[in-house]
Amino acid sequence: MKRLLFYGAFSFLFLQFPLLSQAQIGPVGRSATFDVATWNIEWFGAANSGPSNDALQVQNVKNIIVSSEIELWAVQEISHVGRFSELLTLLGPDWSGELATNTGSQRIGFVWDKRVVTKRSSTHILETFSDDFAGRPPLKAEFTISLPDTTMIVTLINVHMKAFGDAESYQRRVNASGRVKNHIDFSSLASASVVFLGDFNDELLSSTFANQVSPYQNFMLDPAGYSVLSLKLEQADRPSWVGSISGSNLDHIFVSNELAASYIPNSINTMDALKSVFGYTAQTSDHLPVYASFGSSIVLDVDDHTIPSAFAVRDLYPNPAQTDASLTIDVPNHGTIAVQLFDALGRMISSSEHNVTAGRHTLPLNLEDVPRGAYFVRMTDGRSSSTKPLVVVK
């Protein structure tokens, strides 16, 4: 009976915040940069796997792509060609995309903004070694990127590597990584601007299989040839796969040295804000997009400490949480931030105040004495406020 009362109360509050069920994110790309992302969209469009509401998943993906303002997406796990076509229709005439043809039920592909990105060519590579890639040979595409102050030609190699933490799967990832690197190093791509990205299904600091060396150590041992951008996320414990509380770094972006000079420092990131969207993993994907930005040297570092124009909550992490969480907020003015925690019945559980300067800040949220359950976190600067759902697990 208590469980029914709890879920009834939580459902009531959920209905008061309907937008929390829609996957949303603010802009992370900028007009002066070329922004690229990789995203495993869990069983996209599959009738019997992944998120159960396929129409909602399509709408959520469309919302994220448009609102993020990222111009080029490498996508994986596209399981329904018709739903992919529906996504392109929803995106509108300024967008285009294509899917791999030599693959199984989980296709890889690209989606791009035609106002900035023009496809020059695309093809499968390494098809002879398809088994090493779990039957999904890499999809290579060359694009022209038109920015306000420069034009770039980049080649993307999109992969969805073999999954699972057993010895055979690990060896297939090792083989596949070596084949991709050899393909780049010993072909016309040796002097090209290359982005190697996708769902690598393994980590970089050590493998998910028995703590063996990463299958991608060959790239990390060649710093003169490649920048392993997503290593920074793993070192900072910023997982891209969020299908469990601990998460894992499975989605990566590497770039060749020819493109590394155009990389905007510190721009590699995951769309962590999506973790604060109620129902994201159930309605959209168990992976977060990973993105990076490129441009000319006149573009400012993304850590340029610009004063925010409005109060905003950027992230509530982790969510679900156990004993503590953190809030990342943008504050336009010096002042006091109030953080309040409410339970599903609307009762205040805790309250704290923080004196901050204008800028971006990370505030702690102590959950040590908070029982498991569903909650809402309300933050206000005295002028405006924001409410985020939070689930506490013990």
Image (cartoon, grey):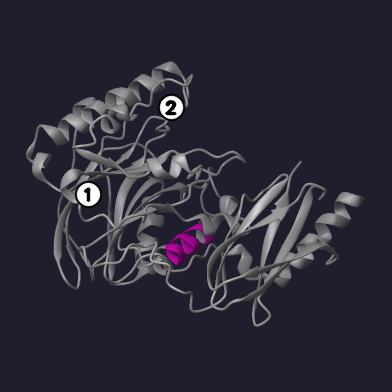
Tell me the SS state at disc 1. Answer: helix
Q: Are marks 2 and 1 in contact (CB under 8 Å)?
A: no
N-terminal of the pair, mark 2 or mark 1, is 2
Up-down: is 339 above or below 326? below
Q: Position of residue 6 (x, y in %)?
A: 84, 55
Residue furthest top as drawn: 167
Mark 2 nearby-residue class (10 Å; few <14, some 14–19, many ≥20): some
Up-down: is 315 above or below 244? below
* Amino acid tagged 2: Ser
Is residue 9 in the magenta section?
Answer: no
Left or right of 341 on screen, residue 255: left
Q: Position of residue 126 (x, y in %)?
A: 19, 31
Left or right of 76 on screen, residue 355: right
Q: Distance from label 2 to label 1 (Cα)?
A: 24 Å
* Amino acid tagged 1: Ala
Q: Which residue is mark 2?
A: 206
Q: Nearer the viewer, residue 138 or 35?
A: 35
Residue shown at 40%/63% (left/top)?
65
Residue 277: image quadrant is bottom right
Q: Which mark is residue 260?
A: 1
What is the span of residues highlighted in magenta in the rendered image? 56-64
Note whether residue 3 is visible: yes
Q: Nearer the viewer, residue 147 or 61?
A: 147
